[in-house]
Image: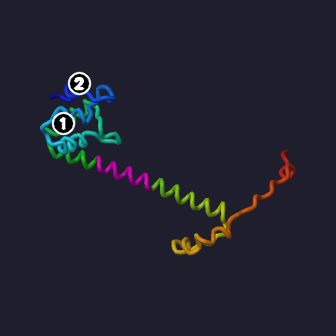
């Protein structure tokens, strides 16, 4: 069967019309090992949504696999690399956000606290001292004539 025939003969509920779904491929090949079908499908689908793929892309990839099966391994490795890159990028962004939050928490809410002086040991050594360094009073607003407008 061709990919467009699989898409039309084995529709899946709530699928994007015209796209090949993993479930359709499983239904089209009931006697094939589902793990092998998943491996082939994952090598064709690159990106976040690994359950559907455009039929023209799937057909082109399958034809290239028929010419040289090692391309399937290359595509799977490309997908893994992209996944790891996305994970490391996400962790980097979250780590940066955490560092900025801790810095501004330290300088904005308890600026005299010595917990960040000699990291990482001092962080836990002075953790119980935070309440004594808490800024509990709100500063007075400057009078309206303190900053004259010319």
Q: Nearer the viewer, residue 20 or 147?
A: 20
Tag 2 near tag 1, CB within 8 Å: no
Q: Write down the region rendered in magenta.
A: 79-91
* Label 2 vs 1, first from the N-terminus: 2
State the residue at coordinates (28%, 47%): 78
Query: Main structural element of the magenta stretch: helix, strand or loop?
Result: helix
Q: Secondary structure at mark 2?
A: helix
Q: Quadrant of the C terminus?
A: top right
Query: Residue 113 in the image: x percent, y percent?
Result: 64, 70
Q: Nearer the viewer, residue 52 or 63?
A: 52
State the residue at coordinates (33%, 42%): 47
Query: Residue 143 in the image: x percent, y percent?
Result: 85, 52
Q: Which residue is mark 2?
A: 8
Is residue 72 within the magenta segment? no
Of badges 2 and 1, nearer the viewer stands 2
Which image quadrant is residue 128 in? bottom right
Q: CA distance from mark 2 to mark 1?
A: 18 Å
Q: Which mark is residue 142?
A: none
State the residue at coordinates (33%, 48%): 82
Q: Which residue is mark 1?
A: 62
124 left or right, relative to 11: right
Which image quadrant is residue 1 in? top left
Query: Residue 141 in the image: x percent, y percent?
Result: 80, 54
């Amino acid at each position: 069967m061709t990919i467009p025939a699989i898409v039309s003969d084995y529709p899946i509920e709530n699928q994007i019309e015209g796209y090949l779904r993993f479930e359709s491929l499983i239904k089209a090949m009931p006697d094939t090992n589902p793990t092998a079908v998943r491996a082939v499908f994952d090598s064709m689908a690159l990106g976040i949504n690994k359950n559907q793929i455009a039929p023209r892309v799937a057909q082109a990839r399958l034809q290239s696999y028929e010419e040289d099966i090692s391309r399937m391994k290359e595509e799977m490795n490309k997908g893994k690399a992209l996944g790891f890159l996305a994970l490391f990028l996400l962790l980097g962004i979250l780590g940066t956000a955490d560092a900025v939050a801790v810095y501004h928490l330290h300088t904005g809410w308890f600026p005299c606290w010595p917990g960040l002086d000699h990291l990482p040991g001092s962080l836990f050594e002075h953790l119980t001292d935070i309440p004594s360094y808490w800024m509990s009073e709100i500063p007075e607003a400057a009078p309206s004539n303190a900053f004259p407008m010319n």
